[in-house]
Amino acid sequence: MRKRRELGQSSDIAFLLIIFFLLLSGVTASHSLDLNTSNSSILVGEAQEHLELTLKQDETVLFQDRVLNNAELTPFLNQKPHLTLSIEAATDWQTVVSFLSLLEQYPLSSLSLEVVP
């Protein structure tokens, strides 16, 4: 009776899996968003509106304890305000990125981000 040696096939598969996982670990997805604020300028002594918004984990935006939709935000954001965005800690990163990409359409003077519990 002959013994079959299948070590060659197993080692080939193991080698290919090692290469696969090494390549896979080198692939990184960028979860960043570039905000262009070069068009805005802040003048000393200029009276600009300061706007404070809160982004909640259920994707709602609060302004002075009132829920605003995108259409209601437009008049506030078109005035080139200094925006402080408070983000609830449990908010999904995709929600934050989506909201920041929405803000990119408006001429903001400055943008501050803070995470609140």
Image (cartoon, helix red, strand yellow):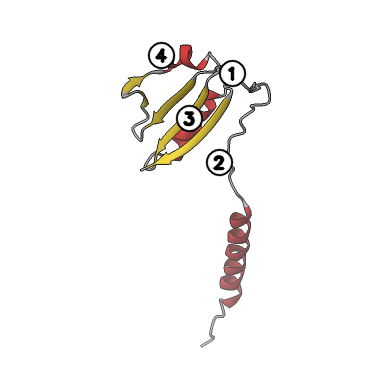
The earlier-in-sequence mark between 1 and 4 is 4
Q: Which kind of residue does numbered mark 3 sit on?
A: Thr
Q: Position of residue 63 (x, y in %)?
A: 37, 23
Q: Which residue corresponds to the image point at 36% horizontal and 27% vertical from the top-left?
A: 60
- Per the model, the C-alpha gap separating discs 4 and 3 is 17 Å
Quadrant (top left/top right/bottom left/bottom right) for the C terminus: top left
- Per the model, the C-alpha gap separating discs 1 and 4 is 16 Å
The earlier-in-sequence mark between 2 and 4 is 2
The answer to whether mark 1 and mark 4 are in CB contact below 8 A is: no
The residue beneath circle 3 is 84
Q: Which residue corresponds to the image point at 31% horizontal and 24% vertical from the top-left?
A: 65
The residue beneath circle 1 is 107
Q: Nearer the viewer, mark 1 or mark 2?
A: 1
Viewed as shown, does residue 115 lie left or right of 16?
A: left
Q: Which kind of residue does numbered mark 4 sit on?
A: Glu
The residue beneath circle 4 is 72
Secondary structure at badge 4 equals helix
- Per the model, the C-alpha gap separating discs 3 and 1 is 14 Å
The answer to whether mark 2 and mark 3 are in CB contact below 8 A is: no
Label 2 environment density (alpha carbons within 10 Å; few <14, some 14–19, many ≥20): few
Viewed as shown, does residue 41 lie left or right of 106?
A: right
The earlier-in-sequence mark between 2 and 3 is 2
Secondary structure at badge 1 equals loop
Q: Position of residue 76 (x, y in %)?
A: 47, 15
Is residue 65 placed above or below 91 in the rendered structure? above
Q: Which residue corresponds to the image point at 39% horizontal and 42% vertical from the top-left?
A: 89
The earlier-in-sequence mark between 1 and 2 is 2
The one nearer the camera, 28 or 35, is: 35
The earlier-in-sequence mark between 3 and 1 is 3
The earlier-in-sequence mark between 4 and 3 is 4
